[in-house]
Amino acid sequence: MGFFTSARTRKIKPAKRITGSVRLPGDKSISHRYAMLAAVAEGTSEVRSFSSSADCQSTLDCLKKLGVKIERHNQDITIHGARLRGLRQPAGTLDAGNSGSTMRMLSGILAGQSFRSVIVGDASLACRPMKRIIDPLTQMGARVQASQDGLPPLEIEGGRLKPISYELPVPSAQVKTAILLAGLYAEGETEVVEPTATRDHTEIALEQMGADIGRHGRTIAIRGLLEKGAQLEAKKFYVPSDISAAAFFIVAGLLVPDSNLVLQNVGLNPTRTAILDLLVRMGGRVKTLDVDSIGGELVGNIHLENSVLAGGEISSAAVPGWIDELPVLAVLGTQTQHGLAFHGAAELRVKESDRLKAVADNLRRMGAVVEEFHDGLSLTGKQALHGAEIESYGDHRIAMAFAIAGLVAQGTTLIRDSRCVEISFPDFFDVLGRAAEPK
Ligand code: S3P
């Protein structure tokens, strides 16, 4: 279908149905972690189906600047581990681009190096809070400096680290990961206590690579490796497809009439599948098939059929489980029988854009009634959306969520500044164009 007007603006027409068997990019969260951990492991790691995202390329570029040898053949990557302390002081700054994960998680590793480094980011990343990693890494003994408001760039001077016991003030898998990575370098046992469970890919990968890590309820404990003279073991990794990228197709498959869609080899780690549980509870015809465990991560196919969805209220406790899926779930909320409401999601205001505002603004442009709270949204159900000019705010998940809204709207939708989809899903419009049959 005609998904173009210019390289920057994409035209979306209403869809008659969505069908076929779709392959999505490798999981972005998992790819970042495998790359960083393999970079400081002992030996050579192979990563298959690495994410095609610009964000994960930012991680690879930073690692290369730190002296790590990396070979890339499309989505297959070979990483020659430098060992925990084998990174090299970079010439110049490290550029995390748009990627909060790169900046925050890599800081954990840099805190354990015996050199000074500076990480910068693009205009969006320059507005994202870093105090959340500065506090714990400083307590561990690293010197981490940001601007006065705790914003990037970050200057990190690593060294000998001491273990801490740290209760996360905000549930954040990135912050948890930064502390666990620094914990590899500390002398003794570092503990992180989570207020609510967040994605646990770091814990799984560290277990697979021989780290001394344990979990008890909401507490994760990791013992430093250096005092025992130990190293992480290189591995052969497989990255499942990204459920947060799948989310756009999941919503499209449920909302567009006559749809029948299979999403292949999607990561089904239980800390990421809250969206599936929610949609099934609402009456969505969503099935997971052929589920297997690869490298400690669950992987399977997702089958979807057009469904009538009840809607409802989502509990605040469930928010970290679908934090990245909120924009597209809000679009879905307008098409449910009873609407959708949620609170406890103030974190969405400090993502790649202020996602609560971006979603509310754009839904209103499409004619929807939306109530915006400081920490959530309330969406009336059964709303007829009309095509409109959508502002992506340079945020990949906003651009993709409103492309899906365009499939169920009346008339043509234009997504401005649509190139930002490259941040997580460069082929998004091609894949959608192949699966969606125009009306
Ligand atoms: C991520 C954690 C989440 C998520 C982000 C990826 C990760 O961020 O929104 O897209 O890979 O750990 P926070 O840790 O800031 O909640």
Image (cartoon, rainbow, N blue to C red):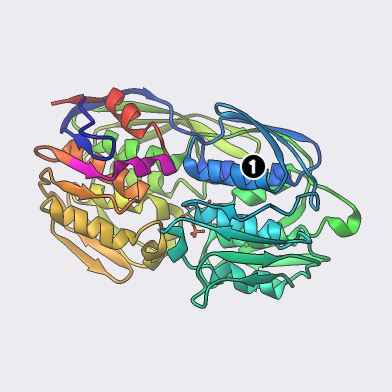
Seen as rendered, the residue at the extreme bottom is 148
293 vs 328: above or below:
above
Viewer can see residue 258: no
- Which amino acid type corresponds to the residue marked 1 in the rendered image? Ala
Range of magenta residues: 414-424
User: Front-most of 193 and 76?
Assistant: 76
| Residue 57 % position (x, y) | 54, 41
Residue 19 on the magenta segment: no
Relative horizontal placement of residue 423, taking residue 359 as reference (left or right): right
Report the residue at 66% width, 51% height from top. 203
Q: Is residue 380 above or below residue 258?
A: below
Residue 438, by quadrant, is top left
Which quadrant of the view contains residue 413? top left
Location of mark 1 (residue): 35
Secondary structure of the residue carrying tag 1 is helix
Q: Nearer the viewer, residue 193 or 423?
A: 423
